[in-house]
C-alpha cells in the first residue's frame, strides 16, 4: 500500500503543508481513490470513488485504512478539516504504524493552526518513517514557525531541501530568514 505524498494542500498558511495519499492493492474504486488523491483531485467524483470503495468493497484493514487516509487528504484539500480529521483518525486507528497517516493529520492540524498537535503528529510520522521525509520536515517547519521557534523552523526547511534538492517551497521559505553568527 502506498501513501501519496505529492499533494500540496493549499491551506490558510503561507505555502501550505504537504500531504500524502496511500496506494492500495488491487483495482476497483479504492485504487481510483488513491490515484485521485495522488493527482491532487478532491472533486465530488473522486470523493465518490472513495465513498463507494469504503461502502461496498471488501478491503483488508490496511487498504481500508489507506482509503480512509486518501479520502481525508481530499477533504483536507477542500479545507474540510473536521471531516478530514474523522477520516484520518479512522485510518490511523487501522494502520497506526504507517507514518503518512500521522503526517497528514499533522497537516490537518496546521490548517487549523493547532501547531503543537501538528508538531506531535509530524514527529510521530518521522519516528515511524515516511516515504518522502522532506515533506514531513517542511510541514514541521511550518509548525515550528507557528510556535515562534524560528531556529527549528529554519533547520527543518534546510533539512527538507537537503532531502529533496531543488524543491522550490523550502527554498522560497528559506529566503525569508536572515542568519547571523554570534
Image: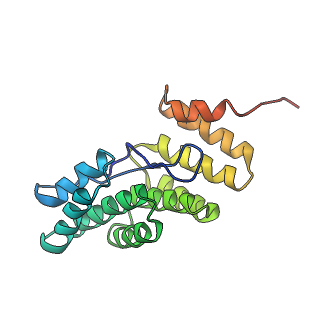
Q: Which residue does the image show at 18% across and 74% down from the upper left?
A: 55
Residue 125 is situated, as x and y percent measured from the top left of the image, at 47, 56
Residue 86 is situated, as x and y percent measured from the top left of the image, at 40, 73
Answer yes or no: is residue 148 visible: yes
Residue 159 is situated, as x and y percent measured from the top left of the image, at 57, 37
Answer yes or no: is residue 124 visible: no
The quarter of the rendered structure image containing the N terminus is: bottom left
Residue found at the very far top of the displayed protein: 166
Q: Which residue does the image show at 62% across and 53% down from the upper left?
A: 143
Q: Viewer-proximal residue, 27 or 113?
A: 113
Q: Viewer-proximal residue, 152 or 169?
A: 169
**Colouring used for the render:** rainbow
Q: Viewer-proximal residue, 19 or 74?
A: 74
Q: How many marks?
A: 0
16 left or right, relative to 60? right
Residue found at the very far right of the displayed protein: 182
Q: Which residue does the image show at 53% across and 56% down from the upper left?
A: 122
Determine which quarter of the picture holds residue 59: bottom left
The quarter of the rendered structure image containing the C terminus is: top right
Vertical side of 158 occupied by 98: above or below: below
Residue 111 is situated, as x and y percent measured from the top left of the image, at 54, 58
171 left or right, relative to 98? right
Q: Which residue does the image show at 38% across and 61% down from the upper left?
A: 75
Amino acid at each position: 500500500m502506498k501513501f501519496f505524498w505529492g499533494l500540496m494542500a493549499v491551506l490558510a498558511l503561507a505555502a501550505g503543508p504537504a500531504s500524502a495519499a496511500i496506494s492500495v492493492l488491487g483495482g476497483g474504486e479504492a485504487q481510483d481513490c488513491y490515484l485521485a488523491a495522488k493527482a491532487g483531485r478532491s472533486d465530488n467524483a473522486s470523493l465518490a470513488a472513495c465513498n463507494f470503495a469504503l461502502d461496498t468493497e471488501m478491503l483488508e484493514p490496511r487498504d481500508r485504512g489507506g482509503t480512509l487516509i486518501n479520502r481525508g487528504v481530499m477533504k483536507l484539500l477542500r479545507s474540510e478539516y473536521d471531516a478530514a480529521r474523522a477520516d484520518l483518525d479512522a485510518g490511523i486507528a487501522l494502520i497506526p504504524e504507517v507514518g503518512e497517516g500521522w503526517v497528514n493529520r499533522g497537516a490537518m492540524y496546521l490548517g487549523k493552526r493547532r501547531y503543537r498537535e501538528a508538531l506531535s503528529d509530524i514527529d510521530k510520522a518521522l519516528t515511524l518513517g515516511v516515504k518522502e521525509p522532506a515533506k514531513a520536515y517542511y510541514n514541521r517547519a511550518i509548525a515550528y514557525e507557528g510556535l515562534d521557534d524560528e531556529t527549528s523552523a529554519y533547520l527543518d526547511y534546510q533539512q527538507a531541501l537537503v532531502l529533496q534538492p531543488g524543491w522550490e517551497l523550502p527554498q522560497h521559505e528559506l529566503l525569508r530568514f536572515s542568519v547571523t553568527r554570534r
